[in-house]
Amino acid sequence: MLRLEARPQPSALWSYGSPILALVLTVVIGIIMFVALGKDPLRGLEMFFWLPISSGYQVGELLVKATPLLIIALGLAICFRSNVWNIGAEGQYIIGAIFAGGVALMADKTTGAWILLPIVLAGVLGGMVWAAITALLRDRFNANEILVSLMLVYVAVQLLSYLVGGPWKDPQGFNFPQTKTFEAVTRIPRLFDGSRVSIGVVFAIVGVLAMWVFLFRTRAGFAQQVGGLAPAAARYAGYSSRQALWTALLISGGAAGLAGALEVAGPIGQLTTYLPAGYGFAAIIVAYVGRLHPVGMVFSAILMSMFYIGGEMAQSRLGLTKSLTGVFQGLLLFCLLACDTLVNYRLRLGRAGRA
């Protein structure tokens, strides 16, 4: 029978080449899938890998979707490097949007541009508060942060549905579950005329640089990783595993909340039940495909954005379901995990030796 045997020394080259191989395998499986569906595979791949970058407008839309994915993934990478498994970034993203939207709804036509700062800070605070619930339950009651953070996603979704269908519902919105459109002064400034790309891109780039400096050039970043991966060694060295837990979750929650604020006060412009777009879950794939490295996650966020846009185009031009986006995302994650397994283990034929 086949069994897995740990490699004495995993290949450093293939550790970084694994995402590329996973992408190639995803493309191959995608071709087979398009053929099985009776569609031209080249036309299908064009929807995902060429049309999203075929014009300046499409590149702009690519950046619009890549921005929240990258910001959330940066926070998640700090969690995962600290051995803290925050799976609930989607909930923190939603709560950040709710906090930011609440501030934006207070504005009127006489409000000045100063309102933008409170909107962004409210989003960050909202995400941190939601992540702090997970940190508290893990720290004080040793609750599983995976289950807690995941269940809080559904609480956040229901809270959003209650607000946009109740107290914050637009009385002029024809009974749709949404708030009124935010005042123009509350909207995140755009970088280019005729494009939806906002200064959120700048936040994402600054976040990449800040994460790289924090993790690889500061003592606090080193302590953060050691505190999560080896609590006993961290205590011996004077580092706190509790501090690593709280720091990781608060940074991750703040990043997700920031993404929610930039999204709701940017391209969307109001709170609606369509706000949860799965960015928090897709960012987990972005983080791992990017090898939890800030530069790698830039490319994986762009790739994931191509899947989002490609799925929409495949729906409108090929008559395929929009769920194809999730299929490609799942395929990429599956192939990545399979490749990573074979990087660290080899297949052996026969019975495992007894100790």
Image (spheres, rainbow, N blue to C red):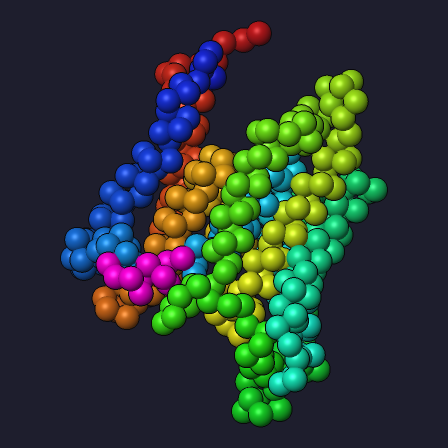
Q: At which x and y percent is residue 21?
A: 32, 34
Q: Which residue is drawn at 45% across and 38% down?
A: 295
Q: Residue at x 66, y 57 (%)?
A: 124
Q: Which residue is drawn at 41% across and 26% down?
A: 15
Quadrant in which the N terminus appears:
top left
Q: In which quarter of the image is residue 113?
A: bottom right
Query: Residue at the top extreme?
Result: 355
Whether residue 130 appears in this view of the structure is no
Query: Is residue 186 covered in magenta?
Result: no
Magenta-drawn segment: 54-63
Image vertical order of residue 50 relative to residue 241, above or below: below
Whether residue 79 appears in this view of the structure is yes
Quadrant in which the C terminus appears:
top right
Q: Quadrant of residue 125?
A: bottom right
Q: Main secondary structure of the magenta part?
A: helix
Q: Quadrant of residue 336?
A: top left
Q: At which x and y percent is residue 214?
A: 61, 35
Q: Which of 327 and 311 is in front in this view?
A: 311
